[in-house]
Image (cartoon, grey):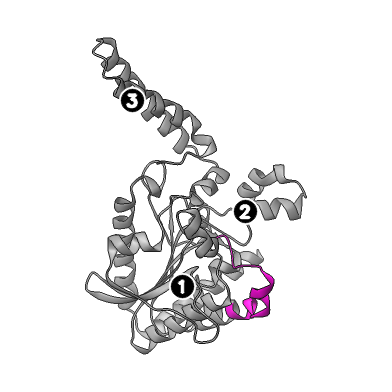
Amino acid sequence: MRDFLEFEKPLKELEERLEKLNKSGSERKAVPRLIRILQARLAKTEQDIFGNLTPWQQTQIARHPQRPSILDYMKHTCEDFLELHGDRTFGDDKAVIGGFATFRGRSLCVIGHAKGQNFKERVKRNFGMPNPEGYRKALRLMHLAEKFKRPVVTFIDTPGAYPGVGAEERGQARAIARNLFAMSRLKVPIVAIITGEGGSGGALGLGVADRIVMLEHSIYSVISPEGCAAILWEDATKTQAAAAALKMTGAELLKLGIADEIVPEPLGGAHRDVESVSQAVAQTLHTQLGQLLALSTQQLLANRHEKFRQMAALADT
């Protein structure tokens, strides 16, 4: 069953009317004509809504409960995915999935956040908020990838790292910092794909990459719009203003030089057609990996270093 967001209510009403007419089985001559009128109105309404999305509306799409996860992308783009578990220190964090897979004849290390798509699974995955052991697991896999000379691909979709007391006691900040340090000098290509939310250090812990690819309706930001509104204005009604001020959409980040490529989504969002968006991601990944694998290790590291130096220079201006 499809979930509708608040701003999609006009679409819900039109689709419900169409469904009733289609199920009515009426043989009245006016019914087919009415169906055609409603279908045309539905198509125009979709174009009007999704052609003029605000940053806050894009944030809502990025957080859609039916948005594809790393497992969906693995299913449609990779073969022989072998998931590996545990950080060899504390336990296995279900909010981070990682392992090795075959992508178009090439072996890859694949790591990503998982939120879950129903309540039971969301609880199991801690709503996509990793603990330190999740980042340590990711780091262990990245070192394996480096040892066997396999490119690393990360799928980012998290509201942020888990802020609980237990996570802090087990070294949350240090675990993320170690990932930033290690990824900055990892001797294999890294492609980060932001598929939904790229929230704060929780996203950055998998986001130091040679290429940063964003889906059209994904977001990438140092803080959530709600958190920004609470800190700057102490007013929850300022969330939409915060979303616009943060410049966190793919289009804005591409202009700023932080994102390298935007993958278009089906009208209405990636959850509308998982297979087509997966194939678009696969084609982008194939192109980006081809470019990166053509570089020497020395050039790869130099380019990565310069990429993030440029971001820092931009932040200072």
Tag 2: Cα neighbours inside 10 Å, few (<14), some, or many (≥20)? some
Callout 2, which amino acid?
Answer: Leu
Q: Earlier in the sequence, mark 3 or mark 2?
A: 3
**Earlier-in-chain disc, 1 versus 3:** 3
Confirm whether residue 61 shows in the render: yes
**Residue 49, x across and y down, in percent:** 47, 34
Q: Residue at left 62%, top 53%? A: 246
What is the three-letter code of the residue carrying label 3? Answer: Gln
Residue visible at 69% across and 72% down in the picture: 165
Q: Which residue is tagged 3?
A: 39
Q: Is residue 186 visible?
A: no
The label number, if any, that marks residue 209 in the structure image: 1
Residue marked by disc 2: 246
SS of the residue at dot 3? helix
Quadrant holding the C terminus: bottom right
Magenta residues? Answer: 158-175
Residue plotted at (51% across, 51% down): 63
Classify mark 3: residues with Cα within 10 Å, few (<14), some (14-19) or many (20+): some
Mark 1 lies on a secondary structure that is: loop
Residue 278: x and y, percent? 32, 57
* Of residues 290 and 226, the one drawn nearer to the viewer in this rendering: 226
- Outermost residue toward the front? 120
Q: CA distance from mark 2 to mark 1?
A: 22 Å
Q: Quadrant of residue 80?
A: bottom left
Nearer to the camera, 217 or 314: 217
In the rendered image, which quarter contains the N terminus? Answer: top left
